[in-house]
Amino acid sequence: MKIERLLCFQAVSQFRSFSKAADNLYISQSSLSKNIKALEDELGGALFIRKSNNLVTLSPFGEFISNEINNIIEDYHILISAADSYKINHSKKLTIATFLNIAHSGILRPLTEFEANQDNFYIETIEKEHSMLRMELAMHHVDVCFGYRELIGDAQDYTIFPLFQDPLILVTTKEQAAARGWKGSLNLADLSTVPFCFPREDLELFTFLNNVCWANGFKPQLTHSNVRLGTIRQYISVGLRCTLQFDSISHSKFYDRQFEFFELKNAPFLTFSMYVENQHAKQMKTKLVDYILKWCDDNNYHVDRGIRPTCLAMEEES
Protein backbone atom coordinates (compact mmCIF):
# COMPACT_ATOMS: atom_id res chain seq x y z
CA MET A 1 0.00 0.00 0.00
CA LYS A 2 1.49 3.32 -1.10
CA ILE A 3 1.42 6.26 1.29
CA GLU A 4 0.55 8.57 -1.65
CA ARG A 5 -2.84 6.85 -2.02
CA LEU A 6 -3.60 7.35 1.67
CA LEU A 7 -2.63 11.02 1.46
CA CYS A 8 -4.97 11.44 -1.51
CA PHE A 9 -7.80 9.86 0.49
CA GLN A 10 -7.12 12.17 3.42
CA ALA A 11 -7.13 15.27 1.21
CA VAL A 12 -10.40 14.38 -0.57
CA SER A 13 -11.97 13.53 2.77
CA GLN A 14 -10.91 16.94 4.13
CA PHE A 15 -11.89 19.15 1.16
CA ARG A 16 -14.85 17.08 -0.11
CA SER A 17 -13.66 17.92 -3.59
CA PHE A 18 -11.32 16.17 -6.00
CA SER A 19 -10.18 19.42 -7.60
CA LYS A 20 -9.41 21.18 -4.27
CA ALA A 21 -7.66 18.08 -2.94
CA ALA A 22 -5.52 17.87 -6.09
CA ASP A 23 -4.59 21.55 -5.79
CA ASN A 24 -3.63 21.07 -2.14
CA LEU A 25 -1.39 18.12 -3.02
CA TYR A 26 0.11 19.89 -6.08
CA ILE A 27 -0.89 17.06 -8.39
CA SER A 28 -3.31 16.81 -11.30
CA GLN A 29 -6.91 15.82 -10.71
CA SER A 30 -6.49 12.81 -12.98
CA SER A 31 -3.50 11.62 -10.94
CA LEU A 32 -5.48 11.99 -7.73
CA SER A 33 -8.43 10.08 -9.23
CA LYS A 34 -6.12 7.25 -10.26
CA ASN A 35 -4.72 7.02 -6.70
CA ILE A 36 -8.20 6.93 -5.19
CA LYS A 37 -9.33 4.25 -7.67
CA ALA A 38 -6.21 2.16 -6.92
CA LEU A 39 -6.85 2.47 -3.17
CA GLU A 40 -10.50 1.44 -3.61
CA ASP A 41 -9.42 -1.59 -5.65
CA GLU A 42 -6.85 -2.50 -3.01
CA LEU A 43 -9.30 -2.21 -0.11
CA GLY A 44 -12.22 -3.71 -2.02
CA GLY A 45 -14.87 -1.03 -1.76
CA ALA A 46 -15.94 2.50 -2.81
CA LEU A 47 -14.58 5.16 -0.46
CA PHE A 48 -16.52 8.20 -1.75
CA ILE A 49 -19.96 9.07 -3.10
CA ARG A 50 -19.69 11.55 -5.94
CA LYS A 51 -22.42 14.22 -6.15
CA SER A 52 -23.61 16.25 -9.15
CA ASN A 53 -22.22 19.56 -7.86
CA ASN A 54 -18.64 18.19 -7.97
CA LEU A 55 -18.66 17.60 -4.21
CA VAL A 56 -18.03 14.20 -2.69
CA THR A 57 -18.86 12.61 0.63
CA LEU A 58 -17.45 9.59 2.35
CA SER A 59 -19.23 6.34 1.67
CA PRO A 60 -20.20 4.21 4.68
CA PHE A 61 -17.12 2.09 3.95
CA GLY A 62 -15.02 5.26 3.67
CA GLU A 63 -16.36 6.49 7.02
CA PHE A 64 -15.49 3.12 8.58
CA ILE A 65 -11.95 3.06 7.21
CA SER A 66 -11.06 6.77 7.56
CA ASN A 67 -9.82 6.61 11.17
CA GLU A 68 -7.50 3.73 10.33
CA ILE A 69 -6.09 5.60 7.34
CA ASN A 70 -5.57 8.77 9.41
CA ASN A 71 -3.74 6.73 12.07
CA ILE A 72 -1.45 5.22 9.44
CA ILE A 73 -0.67 8.67 8.05
CA GLU A 74 0.05 10.01 11.55
CA ASP A 75 2.39 7.07 12.23
CA TYR A 76 4.06 7.71 8.89
CA HIS A 77 4.80 11.34 9.83
CA ILE A 78 6.11 10.23 13.22
CA LEU A 79 8.38 7.74 11.45
CA ILE A 80 9.71 10.39 9.06
CA SER A 81 10.33 12.81 11.95
CA ALA A 82 12.16 10.16 13.94
CA ALA A 83 14.30 9.23 10.94
CA ASP A 84 15.19 12.89 10.33
CA SER A 85 16.01 13.38 14.00
CA TYR A 86 18.25 10.33 13.99
CA LYS A 87 20.13 11.47 10.91
CA ILE A 88 20.68 14.92 12.39
CA ASN A 89 21.70 13.79 15.87
CA HIS A 90 23.63 10.69 14.79
CA SER A 91 25.82 12.79 12.55
CA LYS A 92 26.57 15.06 15.51
CA LYS A 93 28.13 12.42 17.74
CA LEU A 94 30.63 9.60 17.68
CA THR A 95 30.65 6.62 20.02
CA ILE A 96 34.15 5.80 21.16
CA ALA A 97 35.20 2.81 23.24
CA THR A 98 38.42 2.84 25.24
CA PHE A 99 40.20 0.59 27.69
CA LEU A 100 39.93 1.50 31.36
CA ASN A 101 43.20 3.39 31.84
CA ILE A 102 43.11 5.49 28.70
CA ALA A 103 43.06 8.69 30.78
CA HIS A 104 46.68 7.94 31.72
CA SER A 105 47.85 7.13 28.20
CA GLY A 106 47.93 10.70 26.85
CA ILE A 107 45.59 9.98 23.94
CA LEU A 108 42.62 11.43 25.80
CA ARG A 109 43.99 14.91 25.20
CA PRO A 110 43.43 15.02 21.41
CA LEU A 111 39.97 13.48 21.89
CA THR A 112 38.85 16.26 24.21
CA GLU A 113 40.58 18.93 22.11
CA PHE A 114 38.78 17.71 19.00
CA GLU A 115 35.35 17.79 20.65
CA ALA A 116 35.98 21.24 22.11
CA ASN A 117 36.73 22.64 18.64
CA GLN A 118 33.52 21.34 17.00
CA ASP A 119 30.09 23.00 17.01
CA ASN A 120 27.04 20.97 18.05
CA PHE A 121 29.06 17.80 18.37
CA TYR A 122 29.94 15.46 21.20
CA ILE A 123 31.80 12.22 21.83
CA GLU A 124 30.03 9.45 23.69
CA THR A 125 32.77 7.53 25.52
CA ILE A 126 32.55 3.96 26.79
CA GLU A 127 35.32 2.64 29.04
CA LYS A 128 35.60 -1.14 29.26
CA GLU A 129 38.13 -3.91 29.72
CA HIS A 130 39.70 -5.37 26.58
CA SER A 131 37.47 -8.45 26.42
CA MET A 132 34.41 -6.16 26.36
CA LEU A 133 36.01 -3.91 23.75
CA ARG A 134 36.35 -6.96 21.55
CA MET A 135 32.63 -7.62 21.98
CA GLU A 136 31.69 -4.00 21.19
CA LEU A 137 33.64 -4.24 17.95
CA ALA A 138 32.11 -7.59 17.03
CA MET A 139 28.63 -6.09 17.47
CA HIS A 140 29.53 -2.87 15.60
CA HIS A 141 28.41 -0.71 18.53
CA VAL A 142 31.19 1.87 18.27
CA ASP A 143 32.62 4.22 15.65
CA VAL A 144 36.16 4.28 17.04
CA CYS A 145 37.93 2.13 19.62
CA PHE A 146 41.27 2.55 21.39
CA GLY A 147 43.11 -0.38 22.93
CA TYR A 148 46.01 -2.78 22.65
CA ARG A 149 45.85 -4.74 19.42
CA GLU A 150 47.47 -7.85 20.85
CA LEU A 151 44.63 -8.09 23.41
CA ILE A 152 41.75 -7.18 21.08
CA GLY A 153 42.89 -8.83 17.88
CA ASP A 154 41.52 -8.00 14.43
CA ALA A 155 37.95 -6.78 13.98
CA GLN A 156 35.81 -7.30 10.92
CA ASP A 157 34.78 -4.07 9.15
CA TYR A 158 37.25 -2.00 11.18
CA THR A 159 40.50 -0.46 9.94
CA ILE A 160 43.29 -0.66 12.50
CA PHE A 161 45.71 2.25 12.91
CA PRO A 162 48.73 1.34 15.10
CA LEU A 163 49.59 4.54 17.01
CA PHE A 164 52.60 3.53 19.10
CA GLN A 165 54.33 0.60 20.72
CA ASP A 166 53.97 0.63 24.49
CA PRO A 167 56.76 -1.24 26.31
CA LEU A 168 56.35 -2.86 29.70
CA ILE A 169 58.44 -1.31 32.48
CA LEU A 170 59.02 -1.83 36.20
CA VAL A 171 57.55 0.79 38.55
CA THR A 172 59.05 1.14 42.01
CA THR A 173 60.37 3.85 44.33
CA LYS A 174 63.84 5.34 44.47
CA GLU A 175 64.27 3.89 47.97
CA GLN A 176 63.38 0.35 46.89
CA ALA A 177 65.61 0.64 43.84
CA ALA A 178 68.55 1.79 45.95
CA ALA A 179 67.96 -0.96 48.52
CA ARG A 180 67.98 -3.64 45.80
CA GLY A 181 70.88 -2.08 43.92
CA TRP A 182 68.90 -1.65 40.71
CA LYS A 183 70.56 0.43 38.01
CA GLY A 184 70.05 0.81 34.29
CA SER A 185 68.00 -1.79 32.46
CA LEU A 186 66.89 -4.87 34.33
CA ASN A 187 66.23 -8.46 33.31
CA LEU A 188 62.72 -9.66 34.00
CA ALA A 189 64.04 -13.04 35.08
CA ASP A 190 65.88 -11.34 37.96
CA LEU A 191 62.61 -10.09 39.51
CA SER A 192 61.39 -13.41 40.83
CA THR A 193 61.69 -12.27 44.50
CA VAL A 194 59.94 -8.92 43.99
CA PRO A 195 56.51 -8.52 45.66
CA PHE A 196 54.18 -7.43 42.87
CA CYS A 197 50.70 -6.05 42.71
CA PHE A 198 48.95 -6.00 39.33
CA PRO A 199 45.69 -4.14 38.61
CA ARG A 200 42.77 -6.51 38.13
CA GLU A 201 40.08 -4.31 36.59
CA ASP A 202 41.07 -5.49 33.11
CA LEU A 203 41.36 -9.28 33.16
CA GLU A 204 43.09 -9.40 29.77
CA LEU A 205 45.86 -7.09 30.98
CA PHE A 206 46.13 -8.86 34.33
CA THR A 207 46.54 -12.20 32.55
CA PHE A 208 49.07 -10.70 30.17
CA LEU A 209 51.26 -9.45 33.05
CA ASN A 210 51.14 -12.84 34.74
CA ASN A 211 52.04 -14.63 31.53
CA VAL A 212 55.02 -12.32 30.98
CA CYS A 213 56.44 -13.44 34.33
CA TRP A 214 55.78 -17.10 33.62
CA ALA A 215 57.46 -16.74 30.21
CA ASN A 216 60.56 -15.48 32.00
CA GLY A 217 60.79 -18.48 34.28
CA PHE A 218 59.04 -17.44 37.48
CA LYS A 219 55.65 -17.19 39.11
CA PRO A 220 55.09 -13.59 40.24
CA GLN A 221 54.85 -13.04 43.98
CA LEU A 222 51.42 -11.43 43.82
CA THR A 223 49.29 -10.23 46.66
CA HIS A 224 45.68 -11.23 46.09
CA SER A 225 44.37 -7.69 46.36
CA ASN A 226 41.68 -6.89 43.80
CA VAL A 227 42.68 -3.26 43.28
CA ARG A 228 43.14 -0.56 40.68
CA LEU A 229 46.16 1.53 39.80
CA GLY A 230 45.36 4.27 42.31
CA THR A 231 45.57 1.82 45.21
CA ILE A 232 48.67 0.17 43.77
CA ARG A 233 50.27 3.61 43.55
CA GLN A 234 49.83 4.03 47.31
CA TYR A 235 51.26 0.57 48.07
CA ILE A 236 54.34 1.32 45.96
CA SER A 237 54.82 4.78 47.48
CA VAL A 238 55.32 3.29 50.96
CA GLY A 239 57.64 0.56 49.71
CA LEU A 240 55.31 -2.43 50.03
CA ARG A 241 54.99 -3.41 46.37
CA CYS A 242 56.29 -2.96 42.85
CA THR A 243 54.31 -3.31 39.66
CA LEU A 244 54.73 -3.95 35.99
CA GLN A 245 52.96 -1.39 33.89
CA PHE A 246 53.06 0.11 30.44
CA ASP A 247 55.30 3.04 29.72
CA SER A 248 52.56 5.41 28.51
CA ILE A 249 50.41 4.87 31.58
CA SER A 250 53.25 4.86 34.12
CA HIS A 251 54.67 8.28 33.38
CA SER A 252 51.37 10.06 33.97
CA LYS A 253 50.02 7.87 36.77
CA PHE A 254 53.22 7.57 38.83
CA TYR A 255 54.36 11.14 38.29
CA ASP A 256 55.81 11.97 41.72
CA ARG A 257 59.59 12.19 42.04
CA GLN A 258 59.57 9.33 44.56
CA PHE A 259 58.78 6.84 41.80
CA GLU A 260 61.39 5.34 39.53
CA PHE A 261 60.98 3.43 36.27
CA PHE A 262 63.22 0.72 34.90
CA GLU A 263 63.33 -0.54 31.36
CA LEU A 264 63.17 -4.32 31.07
CA LYS A 265 65.57 -5.86 28.57
CA ASN A 266 63.43 -8.80 27.60
CA ALA A 267 59.98 -7.35 28.20
CA PRO A 268 57.37 -7.33 25.44
CA PHE A 269 55.43 -4.34 24.24
CA LEU A 270 51.81 -3.93 23.21
CA THR A 271 50.65 -1.90 20.22
CA PHE A 272 48.35 0.94 21.20
CA SER A 273 45.92 1.06 18.28
CA MET A 274 42.90 2.90 16.95
CA TYR A 275 40.06 0.85 15.41
CA VAL A 276 37.87 2.78 12.96
CA GLU A 277 34.54 1.43 11.71
CA ASN A 278 34.33 1.27 7.89
CA GLN A 279 30.70 0.64 7.00
CA HIS A 280 29.04 3.91 8.01
CA ALA A 281 30.56 7.00 6.44
CA LYS A 282 30.60 9.94 8.83
CA GLN A 283 32.35 13.20 8.13
CA MET A 284 33.16 13.70 11.82
CA LYS A 285 34.69 10.24 12.05
CA THR A 286 37.05 11.02 9.18
CA LYS A 287 37.93 14.38 10.74
CA LEU A 288 38.61 12.77 14.13
CA VAL A 289 40.86 10.09 12.65
CA ASP A 290 42.86 12.71 10.73
CA TYR A 291 43.13 14.82 13.88
CA ILE A 292 44.36 11.90 16.02
CA LEU A 293 46.95 10.81 13.45
CA LYS A 294 48.25 14.36 13.03
CA TRP A 295 48.34 14.88 16.80
CA CYS A 296 50.34 11.69 17.27
CA ASP A 297 52.77 12.77 14.56
CA ASP A 298 53.13 16.30 15.99
CA ASN A 299 53.78 14.92 19.47
CA ASN A 300 56.23 12.22 18.37
CA TYR A 301 53.93 9.32 19.11
CA HIS A 302 55.28 6.68 16.74
CA VAL A 303 54.41 3.08 16.22
CA ASP A 304 58.06 2.08 16.28
CA ARG A 305 58.71 3.25 19.81
CA GLY A 306 57.09 3.87 23.17
CA ILE A 307 56.05 7.27 24.47
CA ARG A 308 56.79 9.29 27.54
CA PRO A 309 54.22 12.08 27.98
CA THR A 310 56.51 14.20 30.14
CA CYS A 311 54.34 17.26 29.52
CA LEU A 312 51.48 15.49 31.33
CA ALA A 313 53.75 14.51 34.18
CA MET A 314 54.94 18.09 34.67
CA GLU A 315 51.40 19.40 34.71
CA GLU A 316 50.41 16.92 37.41
CA GLU A 317 53.47 17.75 39.46
CA SER A 318 52.95 21.48 39.31
Image: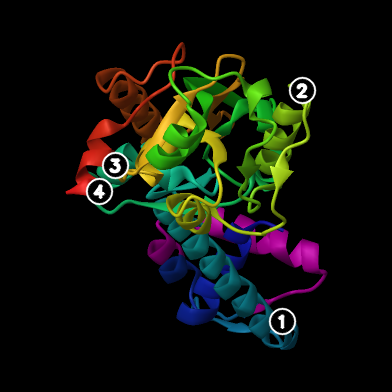
- The amino acid type found where label 3 is placed reads Arg
Q: Nearer the viewer, mark 2 or mark 4?
A: 2
Near-viewer residue (54 or 102):
102
- The amino acid type found where label 1 is placed reads Ile
Tell me how far mark 2 sits from mark 1, CA to CA.
76 Å
Dot 4: element: helix
Task: Identify the mark nearer the N-term, 3 or 4.
Answer: 3
**Quadrant location of residue 214?**
top right
Task: Identify the mark nearer the N-term, 2 or 4.
Answer: 2
The disc label shown at residue 316, or none = 4
Q: Residue at 34% across / 31% down in the picture?
A: 287
The disc label shown at residue 85, or none = none
Task: Identify the mark nearer the N-term, 4 or 1.
Answer: 1
Dot 3: element: loop
Q: Nearer the viewer, mark 2 or mark 3?
A: 3
Q: Is residue 32 magenta?
A: yes
Find disc 1 in the rendering and name its residue.
65
Is residue 6 among the parts visible in the rendering? yes
Find disc 2 in the rendering and name its residue.
215
Horizontal side of residue 294 vs 20, given as left or right: left
Bounds of the magenta span? Answer: 22-48
